[in-house]
Amino acid sequence: MTALAAVVLSQMLIILSWSDARFGTLPNIIIVVLAAVSIGAFLMDNEFTGVVKSNFATNNNLTTEILAESDIGAGACEEEKMSIFS
């Protein structure tokens, strides 16, 4: 936004002294194009982040319970180790 305000001010000053400063319009055009691309990228990033958060909130069915040893079958692993080494 600051870049666009600066370009508007710069272009107004260029118009006031057009004969001496008309070539200052070219950098202003470049700045406007770069600012537009930057704003577009920012808006796309915000839209993508919003969609991801929305989808994650809707589709996240995972539980948040703490995993215990009984959940991963630690006892079964110990029995297999014993049978391998005996």
Image (spheres, grey):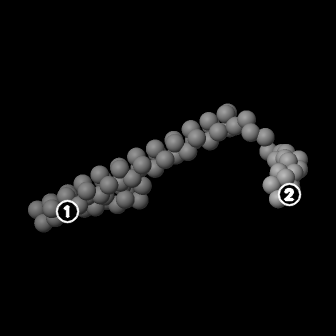
Q: Which mark is residue 24?
A: 1
Q: Which mark is residue 36?
A: none
The 10 Å Cα crowd at callout 2, few under 14, some 14 to 19, many 20 or more, is few
Place of residue 44 in the rendered image (x, y in percent of width and height, measured from the top left): 46, 44
- Image quadrant where residue 22 sits: bottom left
Q: Is residue 78 left or right of residue 32?
A: right
Q: In this rendering, is residue 59 above or below 29?
A: above
Name the residue at 42% across, 55% down: 1
Mark closer to the chain start, 2 or 1: 1
- Image quadrant where residue 4 sits: bottom left
Q: Amino acid at mark 2?
A: Ser
Name the residue at 62% across, 36% down: 55
Q: Is residue 16 left or right of residue 55?
A: left
Place of residue 38 in the rendered image (x, y in percent of width and height, measured from the top left): 39, 53
Q: Which mark is residue 86?
A: 2
Query: In this orientation, which residue lies closer to the viewer: 75 or 9?
Result: 75
Q: Amino acid at mark 1?
A: Gly
Q: In this rendering, is residue 56 above or below 33?
A: above
Element on which disc 2 rests: loop
Q: In this rendering, is residue 28 above or below 76?
A: below
Element on which disc 1 rests: helix
The 10 Å Cα crowd at callout 1, few under 14, some 14 to 19, many 20 or more, is some
Query: In this orientation, which residue lies closer to the viewer: 58 or 66?
Result: 66
Q: Is residue 28 left or right of residue 52?
A: left
Place of residue 9 in the rendered image (x, y in percent of width and height, measured from the top left): 31, 59
